Amino acid sequence: MRGDGSLATVEAARASAWPRHLRAAAAGAFVLALLLVPLGANSFELFLLARIAILTLFAMGFNLLFGHGGLLSFGHAAFYSAGAYTAGFILKAYPSLLLGVLGGVAAAGALGLVVGFFSVRHHDIYFAMLTLAFGMLVYSLVWKWDAVTGGDNGLIGIPRAPLLYPGPGGIPMAPVGRYYEFVVVVTVLVVAFLWRLLRSPFGIVLRGLRENAERVEFAGIPMRRYRLVAFVLSAAIAGIAGTLVGPLENTVGPETAHWATSAEPVLASLLGGASTFSGPIVGAALLVLIKEIVERHTQYWLLAMGIVLVALVLGLRGGVVGGLAALWRRTRAGVSAGTAAQDTVPAGSPGRSP
Amino acid sequence: MTPLLRVARLRKAFGELRAVDDLSLELLPGQFACLIGPNGAGKTTLVNLLTGRLAPDEGRIEFEGRDITGLAAHARVRLGLARSFQINSVFPQLTVVDNLAIPVLARLGRSGAMLSRIDRVPELEREVGRLLAEWHLEAERARPAAALSHGTQRLLEIAIAAAARPRLLLLDEPTAGLSPLEKSQVLAQLRRVAGTGETTFVLVEHDMDIVFRLADRIIVMHRGRVLADGTPDEIRANPAVRDAYLGGTVAGPTAERPGSAPPGAPLLTVERLNTFYGQSHVIQDLSLTVRRGEVVALLGRNGAGKTTTLRSVMGLTPPRSGQVLLGRRSLKGLSPHEIAQTGVGYVPEDRRIFRDLAVRDNLLIAARAVGQRTDGDAGHGWDLARVYALFPDLATLERLRGDQLSGGQQKMLAIGRALMGNPQLLLLDEPSEGLAPAVVRALAGVVERIRTEGVTILLAEQNAAFATLLADRAYIIENGRIRLEASGASLRAHPEALQRYIAVEGTPEAG
Amino acid sequence: MTQTLLFQGLVGLSGAMSLWLVSAGLTLIFGVLRVLNFAHGALYMLGAYLALTVVTSFHQDFWTALVVAALGVAVVGVAVERLFLRPVYRLPVAYQLLLTFAFVLIFDDLVKIVWGAIYQVPPMPAGLGGTVIVLGRAFPVYHLFIMVAGGAVAVGLWALFDLSLWGKLVRAAACDPEMAAAVGINVPWLFTEVFAFGAALAALGGALTVPVQTVSPGMGEGIIIDAFIVVVIGGLGNLWGAFVGALLIGLLHAYGTLFVPVFDLALAFILMAMVLIWRPAGLFGGQTT
């Protein structure tokens, strides 16, 4: 997966048309399979898959900034929560799912603009600290401002509203299977957008910012403005994830803004592999499943998460996908006698910026 | 002709140090200028000011008649003022092609496009292809920059800067760490680009062969100012330049050195030392010996490997292979604090005073830190009183903080601090650098006194006059290898023997 | 009205002092190790729980509890630094942050496992209960005690770093670790000592709040955010800045709860944002210790 989106690999893919078409066909088949799941799954399984999709979105939004842009945010729950609450308000006032999602995304993006404005002028430690602090500010507001947010109880009774408008022709979404398909469609659209984005000029510049922000500036690109754009995009995608939670669970609580929520996309990205495109997807699936299993046996989910995080930082910084890719390269190198081994570079290092 | 660049009364200070001091300069389009000067002359600071990496304290910078003093770095690049960096500043995990795509996209004004595919940006592929061919990077196009050799990374470093197709290109030591073959590749390419007349060049360079071969104008900086400015012939004939590089004539304590003790047993033995910075093989199979009671000089130009040799001995840049012995004890694998406790004192080139500690505390913590010498040797009994006797200035300044001292005073303090650890061996890295001639004379007296008090000294210097005056023996180092070993007396008698390694001129036949 | 304001100021000062203890350790560790310890709030919480256990389960007096809490958490600090932090000093900053963040999660749950999630109500140490009349109102004696303790720690830290040799070694290592090693200082071991010392300060801050605050698993979260704001305002790595920052935030909270109870945390953020725009490195940034 290394080198995804590089000009060189895109060129190479174009030169031999087969792999690219094969890839597209495989992706299409996978999406089709996801959409057909409701035919054979019970509602618990659908809930679980929807949660995986939502965390996938959240993690991919976060990882746009972290794995690709080199900025580690500890406050992404703020945008997730802003999306969730805004969509909740809208859905309770006027039941239109599309309106709720769009409103939530706009709110999360606007919040991202404000937080980003203060945060992107700093990097590394200050950046992490500021995003965490802003995140906790949002948490305290959500939690304390009873009159608007419902305080501790949160917003309850959020409907799985029709897609467009109430009444005939509005495309009802109430059945879990139907809503699950909506979540899948949104997720696929966002993932496709990111796939394209990371292969665009902006995507390469973004990875340049991760590798060496100063050199980007000296290539003639206003690096702070680019970071801010990336920050807003990342916040908006986290916001999309947030908007999908309320209608699924029928409720949104202040814990959506808590830093334990901010930790989930961090963990999903690292678990899957932050420097790869598919890492957050794999990580989100693993994380939701592990959580499901751990919580059956113990209530100490955070402890498990912490231990996994320590292990990832100390031992497996490339994540599952990164690790598998390295293994694959090693096997291949074994076959073609060593030449490929020279291509191995020290494991990806997001967060590295001067 | 209107100047391409006009710099008026530029100033930049870092605390006490006036790195660029009231400097004015004009550059005409089409010139190929080299900026030279001893270490610490302010060359890199000047480049940083011109390109917007640093903001000046005072002064004005005009580019093509336009005031750019307050302009952001990226905006200067867009106007046509680009640079490369002294230390490779590439995008390590990106492929060579992507490294080049970033500046090309910026120049094409397409760097912000989010939805167009990278391989469909018009012009991009052609332009990147052109750069790959020009800078001999075609074979490496799909490899990550981090996997390239140092020399190839260096080419990429310059190519990224050139990708902006600037009107003015500032290259900060473009050939640093390159092999002769790579150097000639870079130079050939620079000459080719210069031939098109599109780009005006300013090179910061230490390799005098290159400077005198390539430049049609040489600007010599010294202590933040322009010391000399002219054609290569004018510079070669300029006595002030010769002094700045060779340290002029230093009238030492005495012409003949008193009491040259009979050489003792080897105190420091370095055998086949190899040291790397990342991919860069800086010290190559270096061997040298310092006997008890000697002053030995390690002479060479900037970048020859002097500092790295001392750092390897001190354990700060551990060597990859080779042997370092102090007396009979191997220093290999010891950490720097253990090496200090074994009896090695280190005075770094840039002094590195603990700036928020008082002078007195700087000295006391060094004494305390090596409190129990692990070899059981009581050392030479240095204490505050003896250091103050050696440097009377420090006694009067003892309550001041390290950063309130002048450069010369900091140098004294750094030497005093090293002595407080009771070293058997003192490593002195360019003690004379950046000091006024009178201070250099005083320093020569100090080094001589330290030697007579029983401390063995290994001295790294590019100031040949200063070093040969003091040294019993000297090693000449070039490109990380020892080229010559000579006695101090023979070098004092025949200073011209050093010309080839130290002097400002390029070797005549090299052009 | 004036009396109310003055009185609330006193409340704010006593709040500022426990914040100061946590921020002092945080900024000290950053100043020397260049690692921002997200788990510092968790160490504060650990100190509170240890003190509580010493008092309620082992029936020792409060002073013993303070000492045990500080020493116990210092030992935890030694273990965390040597086993986990040391391998990541060479990695990108993001991984250092992630590692200390992992310990926030771990300690939060460990505390729940060992002490249970029940909110503990601790006893008041003898002689520090009751109130005195200040400005015509009843003011808890214990708050006065915390103010004195915070002031004493400030004086103690000043003496430690300005007068003692250990303090000077630490300052030298903070200033230039490589050069410090080259003059013979055992820098890795000094790093361990500093981390343990900072952890002990946090634990002391936690233990001191035990008699007046319910001890609960989430108690580290609020204080670490405040401490972040304090060190950002004061300038990362600057002890004196942390002291001033803690006073500012303590007072701001006290008046905030008086005038705009819902948004009191927001006030601190607005202050932080203003400081960052005006002086990006904090009020005392760019200076050391």
Image: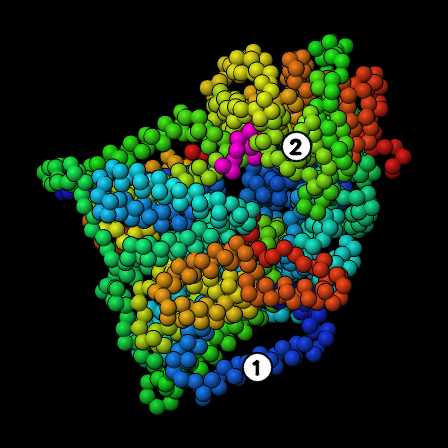
User: Would you say the residues marked 2 and 1 are in contact, meaning their CB atoms lie under 8 Å apart?
Assistant: no
Work out whether C83 lies above or below C63.
below
Residue C125 placement (x, y as % from top left): 19, 40
Q: Is residue B147 above or below residue B21?
A: below
Q: Amino acid at mark 2?
A: Leu
Under circle 1, the secondary element is helix
Q: Position of residue B21 (x, y in %)?
A: 61, 29
State the image quarter where residue C234 is shown.
top left
* Residue A144 vertical placement versus B192 (above, below): below
Front residue of B288/B237: it is B288
The answer to whether residue B271 is visible is yes
Taking the spot 82% from the left edge, 43% from the top edge, the residue there is B180
Q: Is residue B327 magenta?
A: no
- Highlighted magenta segment, given as a residue range: C178-189
Callout 1: chain: A
Name the one closer to the observer, C121 or A85.
C121
Q: Which residue is mark 1?
A: A28
- Magenta region includes residue C182: yes
Which residue is drawn at the image coordinates 44% and 69% (left, top)?
A290
Position of the C terminus of chain B by quadrant: top right
* Residue C281 spot, x, y in % from top left: 44, 42
Q: CA distance from mark 2 to mark 1?
A: 63 Å
- The one nearer the camera, B94 or C102, is C102
Q: Dot 1: few (<14), some (14–19), or many (≥20) neighbours within 10 Å?
A: few
User: Residue at horizontal 23%, vertical 53%?
Assistant: C120
